Structures are given as structure tokens and as C-alpha cells.
Image (tube, grey):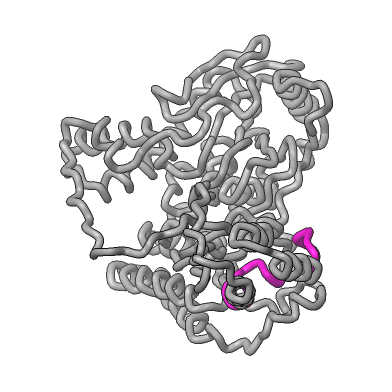
Amino acid sequence: MRIAPLIILSWLTIAAPAAASFDRTAWQQDYGQLKGELVSRYANLAWKASGAGGIDLPALDRRTSAALASASNDTEAGDAIRAFIAAFHDGHLSEVPYLASATAPPVEPAKAALDPAQPVAGCAALGFASTGPVAFSLPLESLPGFKLISDGLSGTFRSGLVTRSGVTMGVLRIQNFRARVFPAACLHAWADLRRTGRTITAAGVRDATRLRWFKDLTAAIETLRQAGATALVIDIGNNSGGDDSGDWTPRLLTDRSVRSARLMMADAPVAARYFGDEVADIDQALVATSSRTAKAALAEARSFFSRQSTAIGQQRCDLSWVWQERRAWSLANCNRLLDAGYAGGFWAGLPPGAYGDGTAATVLSSASTVQQFYGAWTGPTYAIADKRSYSSAEMFAAVVQDNRIGKLVGERTGGDGCGFMTEDEPIVLRHSRLRFRLPNCMRLRADGTNEEAGISPDLLVLPTEGESDRARGERVLNVIAVDVHGASWKAH
């Protein structure tokens, strides 16, 4: 199972150079092209058209058409199309930078050599850098009685202890679900590779860092337990996303079996690449394994992904109705989606040691990559989230909630859901050259709803007028302490 890049990208909008004269018809044709691409490739379109996504697509289409009809220059026309995209409230559906025409073939510089004796420089060259706030999303460190255990700079994760109403909470910050934004994890992995005599390569460091991220997370949890924590609080507020780590991490927080979300792919050519990657990984595992049960499971998975690849484009489903009417959402209705198994692969999850073959298990359920860390914590668990928790952070929140591992505290998450299970080329509008990326996947929760709708908290704690962040942080801790004492946790 390849790691799926789910992280949200923030781009500076760079407008295309203005045309010599304004051509309204060309802009209207661009808009028609954009709508056609959404119909063909946007995984969430039928969901949005049902009204569940919070927008009225026919009304939005009318507004955009009117704005283009009244535009008097390129700036106004471009703004109309950007406003159309923004109205979807989907961070994965977004503009990407304008590219000027190449005047000569691009020249790619040689890759920098990695010096085993220079881990700091090497990790920096590989792109490991802190790109998000290390501090807790609420200033918990500033509250009375909070004891900082790790600052999240010299160590991988920021963590601390705080006691309210007799409940000692171990608080741990996960600012992103992608190892690349944790330089300390890279440095730890680099040291591991040198200590065991393995060669320092870019791929080796990246793979080792991903595993070390989970080892460091497990160690942070154990440190909090030994320090007296009786409840674990995971802060995913202001977490913009990441990769499949959002699906794997909940398994560290329980000793029970955990199911990944059901996965759908857009019924478009991009799905062939995802299904093809799955088949290629399965074929490698089939050659390597000697386990009969593993071979049987791998063959079943291969047959499934091969069938799904063959099914691409066979639905005969025209989604152009979305610009004229609303229709109830259902997987049985016209939606241009294909079953793609689960977020982690063919199986929703596997127990540790499945098939007696770690490689086969990982191919069939990618979370098996970190099975050695399963059940690192089994006590009361809470996740602090807010409206800036997106993408893979929502994946984490949904798996925690749907598998009854713990409770979500704070605000409803931002609502981006699944983004990209494989890379795809952006839309490039023919006239304006504006470029937009389209999400190609959908994750469905246990109740069948789309993660893109956002994850509602079990314990709602909204910001209030005149309240400081410190005061709200205190309120969150008190809400958690009360819940730990209550029967609501025992029944969860």
C-alpha cells in the first residue's frame, strides 16, 4: 500500500498574464470546461449536489454565469471562477500556481549527496522541516499546574501533564500526520540507521523516519503513563492533514481491532493508476510469500483491484444534472464513484501477526506497517479538534470516533475529507491557463456519510465571546476531567 498524500497545500495565487483584450466568450468556455472536468473527475460532486455538502449547485452555477456575463475585464472573470471553486468549501479542490510557458527544456539539478556524518544537513536536504505550529492549539502550557515533558523541538512530540478534578491528563500534540514535518524524527531515524550499519539513502531515511515517528509517539505515550497519566489527550487542533498516518495512529490507542474507513475512487482514468499500484504491490508480495493463507488473501485482493480497474468508465452515469437540480445522496445512485476497498487497502484492518507474513499484511492493510506499536495506550482517550483540523486529521478523528476508541472534544473539523490516493494532473483552463486540482477519493464513515462533511465532536466546546484562548483551554480540560469521572466514558 503506497502512502497516500492527503496533506492540504496552501498556494499563493499567481494570476495569469492579462490578455491583450478581454474575451468574455473565451472565459465562458473556460467555465464550461471547468464544469465538465468536475463532472468527470471530482469525487465529491454527487455528494455536494445532494445538499449534504452545504451548497446549492444550481444557484451557484447561475451566480457564476451571471458574474461572467457582466465581467468587463480578465480580473473580474478570473474572480468569478475562483469564487465558484471557493464556494465548494473543499480545501482539496483548489487553485494551483500558474505556470509560464517554457522557453527551453527544464534542467533538473543533480541530487545532493548525503553525508552520513551530517544528519542535520541531510534531513534538511530531504525536506524535513517543521511547517506547522509545535505548540498546543490552545495555550495549555500556560495554564496553572501544567508540566511540560517535551518541547516538541529537541524531541519529536510536544507533551505534558496536567491534573484537573483528580484526573491526571497526559497531553500530546500532533500538529501534522506526516513524518516530514518532524525533523527530530528524521534525526532519530538517521542515528538508528548508522547504529545498525545500514547505508544512508534518501529512500532509506524516509522509510526509517516514518517508522521512527510511530516509535517516538509510542515512547511519548509511555513516558506520560509512567509520569502518572490516567487519561490521554491528543491535540489535533490546527492540524492541516498528512498521509495514511491518520489511519494508522488510532491503533496505538486501543488493544481492540480497528476498522479503516471505506474508500471510493472517482470513476475516472486516475483510478487506474491507484488500482494498478495496488496490483503491482500485491504481485511483489505474492512472489515473496510462502504462506498459503497469505497467497489466498493476496489473490483475492488482486482479483478485486483488477475488476475495479476494468470497471472504470462503465457506469454510463452522467452527472451533468448537478447544475439543474438536487438529488438525494446514495451510493446506489448516479455518483461516478468506484469501490476501492478501504483507506488502508483491501482489508479494513488485520490483527498483529496476520498470515505470519508482515509484507503481505502491510500490502493488504497498510496500518500493519506499525503493528508492533498497537495498543500502546488502552485507557480513556480524547482528541482535541477544531475547524482547522483537516484531511488526514479528520481521518484520525473519524477512525477514533467510529471505532469507539475515544472522544472528540472541541469544534467540528474543517471538512476536507479524502484528497488524493494517487497523483493526478490538474485541470488547465484553455484560455486563462488557470489551474485547479481535483480530489480523486472519498472516505465513508461507519454510518455511510462522507468525511468531507466534517467530524462532529462528542463533547462540544465552542469559543465564546470575550473568552481568551487560555480560558477556553481550561474549559476543555475541565470538560474532559468531568467526562472521565462520568459513566459516559465507561459506556463509550
From the viewer's side, name the closer residue of 307 and 112. Answer: 112
Measuring 42% from the left and 24% from the top, which residue is drawn there? Answer: 153
User: Can residue 174 be seen here?
Assistant: yes
Q: Is residue 288 above or below residue 157?
A: below
| Residue 18 covered by magenta stretch | no
x then y, percent, for residue 83: 68, 57
The answer to whether residue 487 is left or right of residue 208 is right
Whether residue 333 is situated above or below residue 149 in the rendered picture = below
Identify the image quadrant of residue 198: top left
Residue 155's spot in the image, x, y percent? 41, 25
Looking at the image, residue 105 sits to the left or right of residue 273; the answer is left
Query: Would residue 48 be counted in the magenta stretch?
Result: yes
The structure residue drawn at horizontal position 50% and vertical position 65%, both measured from the top left corner, is 19
Q: Quadrant of the N terminus?
A: bottom left
Number of numbered discs present? 0
Image quadrant where one finds the C terminus? top right
Give whichever of 373, 95 is nearer the camera.
Answer: 95
Q: Is residue 130 left or right of residue 267?
A: left
Out of 219 and 117, give the one closest to the viewer.
117
Determine the image quadrant of residue 446. bottom right
The range drawn in magenta is 38-56
Nearer to me, 242 or 287: 242
Image coordinates for residue 448, horizontal then vertical, percent = 72, 64
Identity of the residue drawn at 49% across and 63% down: 421
As drawn, which residue projects farthest toward the front? 21
Whether residue 31 appears in this view of the structure is no
Residue visible at 24% across and 33% down in the picture = 121
Image coords of residue 246 (percent x, y)? 54, 48
